[in-house]
Amino acid sequence: MKASVLLKSSLLTSLFVISSCATTKYTDDTAKNNYSNLEAGRMYTVMMKDGSKNQKILFRNVDGNNLIGTAGKKDSTEVIIPKSNVAAVRDIRKARTAAGAVVIGAAGVAAIVISASRADN
């Protein structure tokens, strides 16, 4: 019985881990995405090709070959990032949701394992 509970809990954990990897990622390959799915007013993390620090921007629009936004919700400094320098763009909100799901899932699995080990005793 104990091995069966451990097997079930490990399968449940792997399901939560796989589902937590579902974030929205945009790339500069126009065949895959031309940045048309980015929504104005949302925060995104922009990862650069040149290895410089990732930038968080409040996205406004795409203007030709540039992504335009502001440095944050309270900081109105305009940020212009050339598409040619962008390695990937990730949606911050979906990453936070996935991280929360992993924490809740891990707590659930731990509760199942603890209750199953107490039942065996």
Image: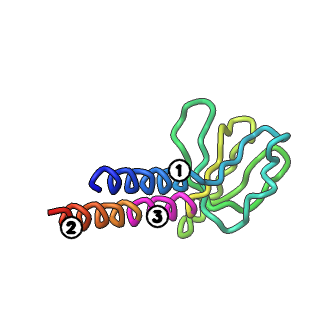
Quarter of the image with the C terminus is: bottom left
- Residue placed furthest toward the top: 50
Judging from the image, the colouring scheme is rainbow
| Circle 2 residue | 119
Q: How far apart are marks 1 and 3 (CA)?
A: 11 Å
Please tell me whether residue 25 is drawn above or below residue 102 in the rendered image.
above
Select label 1 or label 3 by which is in front. Answer: 1
Residue range (magenta): 94-104
Estimate the x, y position of residue 55 in percent, counting from the top left: 56, 48
Instruction: Name the amino acid, label 3.
Output: Ala
Q: Does the magenta stretch include residue 98?
A: yes
Q: Residue at 81%, 55% (x, y): give it.
A: 36
Picture residue at 53% right of the left edge, 57% below the top: 95
Give the quarter of the image for residue 52.
top right
The mark found on residue 9 in the picture is none
Q: How far apart in space, not on screen, are marks 3 and 2 (Cα)?
A: 27 Å
Residue type, numbered disc 2: Ala
Mark 1 or 3, nearer chain start = 1
Q: Name the residue under label 3.
A: 101
Position of 77 with respect to 28 (left or right) is left
**Earlier sequence position, callout 1 versus callout 2:** 1
Disc 3 is placed on an element classified as: helix
Along the line of sight, the residue nearer the viewer: 96 or 85: 96
Image side of residue 25 versus residue 15, left or right: right
Mark 1, secondary structure of its residue: helix
Q: Which amino acid does label 1 sit on?
A: Ile
Q: What element carries label 2?
A: helix
Horizontal and vertical percent position of residue 108:
36, 66
First-in-chain label (3 vs 2): 3
Residue identified by numbered label 1: 18
